[in-house]
Every structure is written in structure tokens, then in C-alpha cells.
Amino acid sequence: MRFAFKLGDIETARVEFYRNPWVGTMRITADGRHVVFVDPTRLTTHFDFKWVKRYTFVVGQGERHEVTIEHERPVWMGGLKPNTYRVFVDGQMTEMHQGY
């Protein structure tokens, strides 16, 4: 799954999300800077009973926004079904994606 979005009116920030479903690598960057990185060599990347994971971070210097990306996987056979990704900016859901 890969998606990107821009936010901000005066000071724009670009946030990119990437997740490889085969090895479990996940990366979130804001303006080219790594904000979140999930390492596929960690055991909790593949075996974790949290069905919804939330990644929260702040982007911008003058115009700051709190961004939360929720990653929800299906309970039954989660690796074989599409996952749901929700993007919240300043507490409001702005977009939703489904895929692997």
C-alpha cells in the first residue's frame, strides 16, 4: 500500500505512507524526513494481536498539524485480506484507503 497527501494552507507539508505486505516494512515520511519506520526483522512486526495500530506525529513549523494514521487489519486471516488505513488531521478523518 502506498499513498501520499499534502496538508497546510500557507506552509504545505507532504506526507507519504508505504507498507510492503510481503515483508512487513512500513515507512511514513513527512517532507522527506522519516517519522515512523517499522522494521521487518522485529518479531512484533509479524506477530502482534493489536488489530488497530495508530501512528501519531506533528508536521510543520509555523503551521503545525497533528497527523494520525490508523492501520486496521482484519481479525481473521489478516495477512490475506485488504487492510484499512485511515488518515486523521487535527482530529478529523480526511481520507481512507483499503488495500494490501
Image (cartoon, helix red, strand yellow):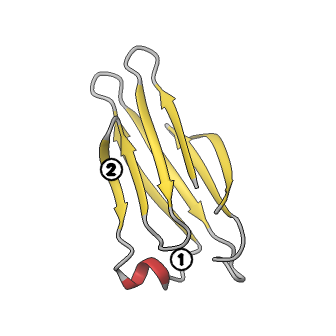
- Total numbered badges shown on the rendered structure: 2
Q: Taking 85 as reference, is 90 above or below it?
A: above
Residue pictured at 35% horizontal, 80% vertical? 42
Position of 1 with respect to 41 (left or right) is: right
**The N terminus lies in quadrant:** bottom right
Q: Nearer the viewer, residue 32 or 64?
A: 32
Return the x and y of residue 97 as percentages of the image width and height: 67, 50
Q: Nearer the viewer, mark 2 or mark 1?
A: 2
Quarter residue 22 falls in: bottom right
Is the residue marked by circle 1 packed among few (<14), some (14-19), or many (20+) residues within 10 Å? Answer: few
As drawn, the residue found furthest toward the front would be: 22
Do the residues under discs 2 and 1 have CB atoms within 8 angstroms?
Answer: no
Q: For residue 58, which quarter of the picture? A: top left
User: Which of pointers 2 and 1 lies earlier in the amino acid sequence?
Assistant: 2
Query: Gap in Å between the C-alphas at discs 2 and 1?
Result: 21 Å
Q: Position of residue 78 (x, y in %)?
A: 66, 77
Q: Left or right: where does residue 38 sit relative to residue 20?
A: left
Instruction: Return the residue nearer the eye: 70 or 36.
Output: 36
Q: Amino acid at mark 1?
A: Lys
Q: Nearer the viewer, residue 61 or 18?
A: 18
Quadrant where the C terminus is found in the figure: bottom right
Residue furthest top as drawn: 10
What amino acid type should be assigned to the residue bearing mark 2? Val
Residue 71, x across and y down, in percent: 56, 61
| Residue carrying label 2 | 35
**Residue 50 bears which disc, if any?**
1
x, y (%) of residue 36?
35, 56
